[in-house]
Image (cartoon, rainbow, N blue to C red):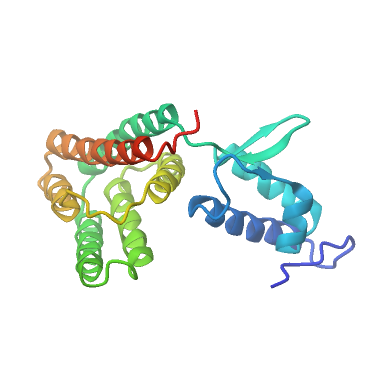
Amino acid sequence: MRIADGKEGDSDLSAPQTIATTVYLKLRDDILNGVLKSGSKVRVDWVVEYYEAGASPVREALTRLATEGLLDHRDQRGFSVKPVSAHELDELTRTRCWVEEMGLRQSIGNRNLQWEEQVVLALHRLTRASCHIIEKPSSIDAEWEKHHGAFHRALIAGCGSNRLIRFSDQLADQLYRYRILAKSDEASPRDCLEEHRLIAESALDGDADRAVSVLVNHYEKSAALCAGRFRLSNGFQN
């Protein structure tokens, strides 16, 4: 489907931004889900042709993705999908733990009925999605991922810092990419639903130390599982 013709002189001055955002979202989705392979070049002319958009919004979208850490950009060499590496996986995980510890502690300190209801509802929806995965393991992944992200976002939603939440979202996206690329048909030895329940229970009880401990442990387990699968498949690129 054509996004836009990208011609100059369009009467709607907001169109270039809308086009850039559309290209950005599509490229981002393709990178996160492994459609665009790790380390592969992303040429402006190819994106223009493939997504049927003008060069200016395409460059804007690519620059935004590079700023968010999903693309590499080097002078004279253009853009490429950021390679996966053990170092980056470790760095992303540690940074997310630091950032979300602060967000979770602040949310617990600021807790009110609205935040508590948001966490309870997010856990309920994640639980329902988890039950569907058990019944249909290959068909509900997208639904589970949606509710999984919403649950983790709800935990820090009361921190009072939109900047922290946005940064956390970027880290979550990059780690989601690692989880997707490391996905295996083998059953996970973890009880992820129980891990999420413990995080929520601790947060709702106002026990910040315990909530942070189980949250960090949850993220570290995910990173270790990804790293193990990458090493088995020689998936790390540097």
Residue 14 visible somewhere in the drawing: no
Residue at x-position 41% and y-position 39% = 164
Residue at 68% x, 61% y is: 18
Query: Quadrant where the N terminus lies?
Result: bottom right
Q: Give x and y (percent) for residue 139.
A: 34, 70
Name which residue lies at 85% across and 66% down.
10
| Residue 238 is at least partly visible in this image | yes
Residue 51 in percent (x, y) is at: 70, 62
The image quadrant that residue 48 belongs to is: bottom right
141 sits to left or right of 43: left
Closer to the camera, 116 or 30?
A: 30
Question: Is residue 206 positioned above or below 46 on the image?
Answer: above
Left or right of 162 in this view: 159? left
Front residue of this view, candidates 65 and 124: 65
Frontmost residue, 6 versus 203:
6
Horizontally, residue 25 falls left or right of residue 112, namely right
Could you say where residue 50 lies in the image, as x and y percent from the top left? 72, 61
Q: Quadrant of residue 4?
A: bottom right
